[in-house]
Image: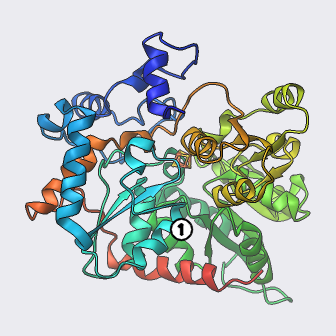
Amino acid sequence: MSSVNTAIQLSVRGASAASTCGTDLAKGPWEFDLAAALDGVPGYGPGASVADPAPPSTPRQAQIPQEYKDASAEELDARIIAAKAALGDRAVVLGHFYQRDEVIKYADFVGDSFQLANAAKSKPDAEAIIFCGVHFMAETADMLSGPDQKVILPNLAAGCSMADMADIASVEACWAQLEEVYGPMDAVDAEGKVPVIPVTYMNSSAALKGFCGEHGGIVCTSSNAKTVLEWAFQRGQRVLFFPDQHLGRNTAKAMGVPLEQMPMWSPRKPLGGNDPESLEQARVILWHGFCSVHKRFSVAQIDKARAEFPGVRVIVHPECPMPVVDAADEAGSTDYIVKAIQAAPAGSTFAIGTEINLVNRLAAEYPEHTIFCLDPVICPCSTMYRIHPGYLAWVLEALLEGEVQNQITVPEQVTVPARIALERMLAAKP
Ligand code: SF4
């Protein structure tokens, strides 16, 4: 089975019948880094998040030396292998599940964002951690790694459009407005509960994790969101959940919270677009954020899969919209999806609702099953796509020369409270 990137190249050349969500996907990511630098407007580039507005603070990537852009795939392969061998244990390469095959093949560890942050911790002697994922993941790795370890993001433009939908200024403004409605945020009711517990998804900036640490809140992943919400409801009358409305809604709904008690907070509207009464009744206030990769999945795609493959097992990620999760057989994190496929009897058929690079790789790794992506259009995560072997070769060879390119550093005043929120998550028990 060819890689997602090869399938894109064939499609754009007209050499296959597959369709992609944009012909620009066939270009080198440096073309978008250059465009962002020239017109001053940062963007997420081609892929699922192409139409999402990128805030002005979105990091940009300077141009890498021409030799890395001109090098053939074979030359880059030889250079990356040689640089890794020369660096040995000095550097560890981490690859997220959604990363392209042409990069993931060099990863010492492959996993979801939290697994990779822990993998970084397991290599305390590595002086450099090269994170082939997106910006918030590199931040988490920096906060959990040793003080002398340097975390490197090969392309700084590899952000996350969902994480960018909640910034610290908007969350602080929201908190101040909620305080006007609920009164002092540290006042407890007869049950000893404060008015609101902030909960941030792992897919958020370090600043938001720090905000949660400072305000009695916590971090969650897509694997432990239910446990974390239970933790929060033991301590608060309500939860403010950001940035992903879908994970918050799907999780709270499965726990029995009525939809009418889950108002949406739109950061640009007064009171988030709500009236004080609905906020008073709220159990979970959902931030207006979403993942454009998982927003592409639909109930119609599930219906089509069931019609074409009777008995198909449909598993979607909980970042998908609620009707999609309701129509699927199961919803679970990337780790859940991988384990479900590993445990299935040979000959099983799976329709999967998550990022195409992971689905494609699983289909190749488990040929005894039939595995396909619910979305027939090839549309990878725009920001994972910004990591290309050229950038990986550049940061590795720079390390050999004693230069650290693209280091991600979280300030200590953010790291300290963010670690508190992360530690609360690790201590939360089902
Ligand atoms: S898949 Fe969605 S949440 Fe994950 S990095 Fe891409 S845009 Fe962000």
Residue depicted at x 64% and y 55%: 334
In this picture, is 415 found above or below 132? below
In this picture, is 160 found above or below 381? below
- Quadrant of the image occupied by residue 173: bottom right
Residue depicted at x 75% and y 74%: 227
In this picture, residue 139 sits left or right of residue 184: left
In depth, the one of 76 and 422 nearer the eye is: 76
Tell me where residue 46 appears, x and y as whole percent.
Answer: 44, 29
Residue type highlighted by circle 1: Phe
In this picture, residue 61 sits left or right of residue 21: left
In depth, the one of 237 and 253 nearer the eye is: 253
In this picture, is 233 found above or below 221? below
Residue depicted at x 25% and y 62%: 407
Tell me where residue 255 appears, x and y as whole percent.
Answer: 87, 65
Residue depicted at x 34% and y 25%: 27
Callout 1: helix, strand or loop?
A: helix
Asked if residue 414 can be seen in this view, the reply is no
Quadrant of the drawing holding the N terminus: top right
Tell me where residue 251 appears, x and y as whole percent.
Answer: 79, 60
Quadrant of the drawing holding the C terminus: bottom right
Asked if residue 380 can be seen in this view, the reply is yes
**Residue that lies at the very extreme toward the top in this rendered image:** 14
Residue at image mark 1: 114
Q: How is the image coloured?
A: rainbow
